Amino acid sequence: MLSLVNDILDFSKIEAGELKFERSPFDIVKIVEQVRTDLLPQAQKKSLSLHYTAEGEELRFVQGDSFRLKQVLYNLIFNAIKFTEEGSISVHCLLEPVNKHITKACISVQDTGIGIPVSKMKEIFGAFSQTDASNTRKYGGTGLGLTISKKLVEAQGGRINVSSKEGRGSEFEVILAFDKASPKAVETEVKLLPKHTENFAGQKVLVIDDDKLNTRLVEIILHKWGIEPVLANSGKEGLAQYEKQQVDLILCDLQMPEMDAETYYAA
């Protein structure tokens, strides 16, 4: 339901011309890797492999709206997983210089799924559209993901290409041009890059938040990382959990009834 509401809100903003794009430095490669990592459990549930490769990684630092790029990639990769019953999904990121100030990013998502009939190719980017009514019943979805993705990309001066063979799979390619990030921004981003992959299996994190939706979201993320979450809905409950068992890390909401984060840590 939340996904449906967000899709409709985004669609309405785009149609009204009210959607604004940020211009902040970010790492394209890291964004693609994050989306792949987030959606890997969905692929694994269906015994699908989800590959990722990159070329031109020295051009990875750019200026633009990383959130909207991530949104487009989530839509494309999630669709690839949803409409693939066996085989694999391959994501490839190619970065090329347009000139000394601009980098072109070509990100393709290829699957071995059900494919798209030739007669339906022109319709797939239409609002609330799927290639077949039976697909809506079988796979679900709002039919807005591709529409929103196409409009988001085109609003930034880019384009989405698609090729497909029914019964053999599809490939969607996003092409966008970004200004290169400043040297100072690049230096900051490089410092944030992980030096090696950590293994969090067996670690325990105490999550204290009076908003149950927040605790549920953090719980899902921690499970993906192999971390055992310990949940508490108030500072007092969190304190009781801490005294009862040993944890490796505490994540605490700043403002809560009865006991806020400052009072909790003092205790």
Image (cartoon, grey):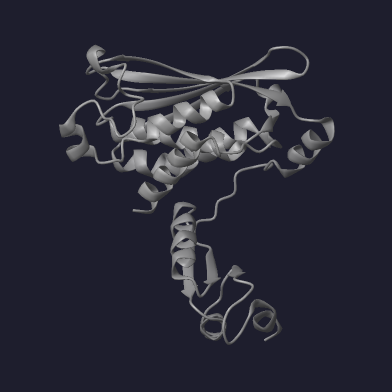
Instruction: Reply above or below: 74 against 175.
Output: below
Q: Position of residue 33 (x, y in %)?
A: 54, 35
Say if residue 48 shows up in the picture: no
Front-most of residues 246 and 105:
105
Residue found 49% across the figure and 53% down from its top: 225
Q: Is residue 190 found left or right of 21 in the rendered image?
A: right
Image location of residue 191, percent across then percent down = 77, 42
Q: In the visual, does 119 lie left or right of 53?
A: left
Q: Is residue 258 above or below residue 222?
A: below
Q: Nearer the viewer, residue 234 or 248?
A: 234
Give the image location of residue 73, x and y in percent: 48, 33
Residue at position x 32%, y 15% in the image: 164
Would you say 117 lies left or right of 164 here?
Answer: left
Residue 36, can we see it?
yes
| 4 with respect to 101 (left or right) | left
Quadrant hosting residue 100 = top right
Numbered disc total: 0
Residue lying farthest front? 16
Which quarter of the picture shows residue 170?
Answer: top left
Q: Residue at x 45, y 31 (%)?
A: 149
Q: Nearer the viewer, residue 129 or 225?
A: 129
